[in-house]
Amino acid sequence: MTEALAPYAHALAALGGWAIVMLVLIPVSVAGKPRGRTESGHPVRDYSDPAYRRSRAFRNAIEITGPFVAATLAAILVGASPFWVNLLASLFLVSRIAMAAVHIGTENQTARSACWFVGLLCCLGLALLAVFGAFAL
């Protein structure tokens, strides 16, 4: 690892970890037969259906991937505080693993929303670090 990137090792590991989570969610999302399908082929919205929850967990992960990757890389590139970049990227990864587990394994909307919100706040924090870092004097 280059000397310039070494301070961001945890954030870079979180990016790699997120890639692994996504790769695991791909086959998980299509496992099993849903109770019903929409015209587009996706499982019918029914949180009591494990196939729907698995599919939804993957689609939800897809939705946040772009903002997480962009915000993390931008924060690293502008030289934002490694402490905060590493903390927020690592916390994002933990919150999203927890969210996937809650989403797939339960129908607990409150826990799922709490995990989602933590991940969202981490992305927002990373994006703000990038924007403020870009305009730092």
Image (cartoon, rainbow, N blue to C red):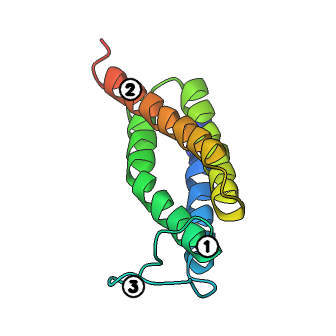
| Residue 49 seen from this side | yes
Residue drawn at (59%, 70%), measured in percent from left and top? 54
Q: Nearer the viewer, mark 3 or mark 2?
A: 3
User: What is the spatial separation of the Cα atoms under label 1 and label 2, in whole angstroms?
Assistant: 38 Å
Question: How many numbered badges does the structure rendering display?
Answer: 3
Tell me if 16 is positioned left or right of 135 in this view.
Answer: right
- Looking at marks 1 and 3 on the same chain, the residue that comes earlier in the sequence is marked by 3
User: What is the spatial separation of the Cα atoms under label 3 and label 2, in whole angstroms?
Assistant: 38 Å
Q: Measured along the vertical axis of the image, is residue 55 above or below residue 76?
A: below
Which residue is identified by label 1? 49
The residue nearer to you, when weighing 38 against 13, is 38
Which residue is identified by label 3? 41
Q: Secondary structure at mark 3?
A: loop
Percent x, y for residue 49?
Answer: 61, 73
Q: Quadrant of residue 31?
A: bottom right
The residue nearer to you, when weighing 104 against 136, is 104
Residue drawn at (57%, 47%), measured in percent from left and top? 12
Badge 1 crowding class, 10 Å Cα cut-off, few under 14, some 14 to 19, many 20 or more, is: some
Percent x, y for residue 62?
Answer: 44, 61
Residue drawn at (69%, 50%), measured in percent from left and top? 98
Q: Measured along the vertical axis of the image, is residue 127 above or below residue 12?
A: above
